Image (cartoon, rainbow, N blue to C red):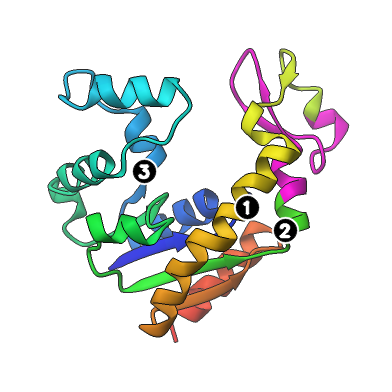
Amino acid sequence: MKVLLLGPQGCGKGTIGQMLSEKIGVPLVSVGGLLRSLNPESSYYKTVKDQMEKGVLVDNQLVGMIIKQELDDPKYAKGYIFDGWARQMSDLNIFDPGFDFVVVFEMLRETSIKRISGRRLCEVDGKTYNVNTLPKEELAKCPGKLIQREDDTEEAVKKRLEIYYTKTMEVVNYFDKQGKTIRINAEPLPEAIFADLIKKLEK
């Protein structure tokens, strides 16, 4: 089974993707994680590292080659779940394996902004906390100072959402026409979202 996850920032694709991976027994492929964990001996390593350090998007053609190389691993023989690809139609021109299902997470823009702009990183252990949802006693467990990444500010989130609702929605419409999309309400807690997804997958 080949599944693609699409949704606006803060919709929980990574969390739900991991839950689905454990449920159906195929790996979750985070494209961002794939790039960050690239082997230093890879011929792509320096170029990817340089582009990521500059804060620019890694060249799509290059990402496509890295994805294809990764999928040669036998562990993907039964399928995979993709998070972080096909954010625009040009991605599919580079790599389109023929997804069986495309899960589209839907939520209000206001929810996306609140979730992402409330996200903080502990400068000591690197864990992520959310000042809008976690109780004060949980936040107090952070061993260091909580900092906000530049791309998690409200202004930055709004810019990323604008890209999602223009470029990525073209991809959603493309898969809609193929009858491959499964739309999921991403407003509730992860357990409820996951239960809804499994119910719709089993239909």
The structure residue drawn at horizontal position 84% and vertical position 37%, both measured from the top left corner, is 135
| Residue at (49% x, 59% y) in the render | 167
Locate residue 18 relative to residue 134 in the image: left or right.
left
* Residues packed near mark 1 inside 10 Å, few (<14), some (14 to 19) or many (20 plus): some
Rounded to the nearest angstrom, the CA distance separating label 2 from label 1 is: 8 Å
Instruction: Name the amino acid type tagged 1.
Output: Leu
Residue at 65% in and 15% down: 123
The disc labelled 2 sits on which kind of residue? Arg
SS under mark 1:
helix
Q: Which residue is mark 2?
A: 109
Contact? badges 2 and 1 (CB < 8 Å): yes
Q: Does any portion of residue 99 appear in the rendered image?
A: yes
**Disc 2 crowd, CA 10 A, few/some/many (<14, 14-19, 20+):** some
The residue indicated by pointer 3 is: 31
Q: Which residue is mark 1?
A: 161
The image shows residue 138 at horizontal and vertical percentages of 79, 31
> From what the image shows, is residue 199 above or below residue 130?
below
